[in-house]
Image (cartoon, helix red, strand yellow):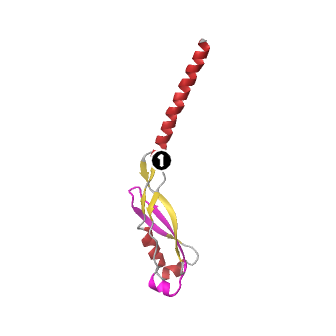
């Protein structure tokens, strides 16, 4: 009988410890989360680009700062980027990127900056 009680006590301690660890795992998930885009405005056409039926995609590298603001926005040069830039579509895409609203990424409960890539597509329907 003593041995059975001893084993039962060990199982109870282990079970209680596993429940405590479960609560800690939930707290870790609250302390670590990815950035979340709240709003991402679309880029608009320039009148000249629309008039000439210019289509294409502008790919940007965007820094989302830990302060909740958009930092650097830089062009990733892709095929046809000069034509898009010539008609003002690159600037339109960069302007839209600067208006992104987001909540910062959290690591150990502290906000951190991240760099993301976004593509703005211009298509005439």
Assess whether residue 89 is covered by the magenta stretch. no
Q: Is residue 38 above or below residue 21?
A: below
Judged from this view, the residue extending furthest toward the front is: 1
The quadrant of the picture occupied by the C terminus is bottom right
Count of marks, rendered view:
1
Q: Residue at x 50, y 66 (%)?
A: 61
The residue carrying pointer 1 sits among few (fewer than 14), some (14 to 19) or many (20 or more) residues within 10 Å by Cα, namely some
Q: Residue at x 49, y 87 (%)?
A: 51
The quadrant of the picture occupied by the N terminus is top right
Could you say where residue 113 lies in the image, as x and y percent from the top left?
44, 56
Nearer-the-camera pick, 52 or 13: 13
- The span picked out in magenta is 46-74
Judged from this view, the residue extending furthest toward the bottom is: 51
Q: Label 1, on which residue?
A: 32
Could you say where residue 70 lies in the image, as x and y percent from the top left?
41, 63
Q: Is residue 36 above or below residue 44?
A: above
Could you say where residue 89 lies in the image, as x and y percent from the top left?
48, 78
Q: What element carries label 1?
A: loop
Nearer-the-camera pick, 99 or 74: 99
Could you say where residue 58 lies in the image, as x and y percent from the top left?
52, 73
Assess whether residue 66 is covered by the magenta stretch. yes
Q: In this view, does 116 lie above or below 5?
A: below
**Which image quadrant is residue 47 in?**
bottom left
Judged from this view, the residue extending furthest toward the top is: 1
Nearer-the-camera pick, 37 or 72: 37
């Amino acid at each position: 009988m003593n041995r059975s009680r001893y084993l039962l006590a060990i199982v109870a301690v282990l079970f209680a410890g596993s429940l405590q660890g479960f609560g800690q795992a939930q707290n870790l998930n609250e302390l670590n989360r990815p950035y979340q885009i709240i709003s991402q405005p679309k880029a608009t056409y320039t009148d000249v680009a629309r008039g000439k039926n210019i289509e294409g995609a502008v790919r940007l590298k965007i820094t989302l700062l830990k302060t909740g603001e958009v930092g650097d926005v830089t062009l990733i040069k892709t095929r046809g980027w000069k034509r898009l830039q010539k008609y003002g579509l690159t600037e339109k895409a960069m302007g839209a990127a600067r208006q992104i609203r987001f909540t910062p990424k959290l690591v150990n409960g502290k906000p951190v900056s991240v760099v993301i890539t976004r593509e703005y597509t211009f298509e005439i329907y």
